[in-house]
Amino acid sequence: MSMRSTIITQIEQVAQEQHVKLPALSDELVLLDSGLDSLAFAILVARLEDALGFDPFTQSDDVYFPVTLGDFIRVYENAAPKFAVAS
């Protein structure tokens, strides 16, 4: 499964568990407009760390908060080579 697919799948799963109706998931979707709250994002990042083996938000010295879904996915894609973990 690709990084993007993993992230999208996890977003959909967290939204379902939190009873959130997601808008269409596109790269332009502003995360604040996704319907997910801070708890849902914390759950999402924790699950992605379990699934991918890294958390780019705690592993990096750079403080960057993604604004859109595309930004969020790119944070993970850009961090993957630095923190690649054997499957």
Image (tube, rainbow, N blue to C red):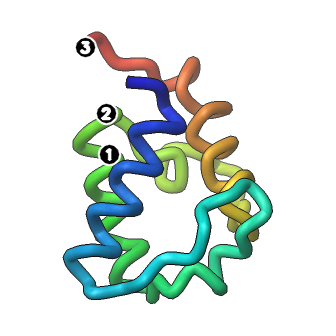
Rendered-image quadrant of the C terminus: top left
- Disc 3 from disc 1: Cα separation: 13 Å
The quarter of the displayed image where residue 86 is located: top left
49 shown above or below 86: below
Residue drawn 72% across the image and 61% down it: 64
How many numbered circles does the render carry? 3
49 shown above or below 44: above
- Disc 1 from disc 2: Cα separation: 5 Å
Horizontal arrangement in the rendering, residue 10 relative to residue 36 (left or right) = left
Residue drawn 45% across the image and 88% down it: 37
Residue at far top of view: 86
Dot 2 lies on which element?
Answer: loop
Dot 3 lies on which element?
Answer: loop
Horizontal and vertical percent position of residue 9: 36, 49
**In the rendered structure, which disc, 2 or 3, sits on the residue that comes first in sequence?**
2
Residue drawn 27% across the image and 54% down it: 47
Q: Which residue is mark 3?
A: 87
Amino acid type of disc 2?
Gly
Horizontal and vertical percent position of residue 52: 34, 34
Amino acid type of disc 1?
Glu
Dot 1 lies on which element?
Answer: helix
Asked if the residue under mark 2 is in contact with the one under mark 1, i.e. CB atoms within 8 Å, the reply is: yes
Horizontal arrangement in the rendering, residue 21 relative to residue 16 (left or right) = right
Residue at far right of view: 28
Rendered-image quadrant of the N terminus: top left
Q: Which residue is mark 2?
A: 53
Between 87 and 19, the one lying in front of the other is 19
Amino acid type of disc 3?
Ser
Horizontal and vertical percent position of residue 48: 34, 48
- Disc 2 from disc 3: Cα separation: 9 Å
**In the rendered structure, which disc, 3 or 1, sits on the residue that comes first in sequence?**
1
The quarter of the displayed image where residue 67 is located: bottom right
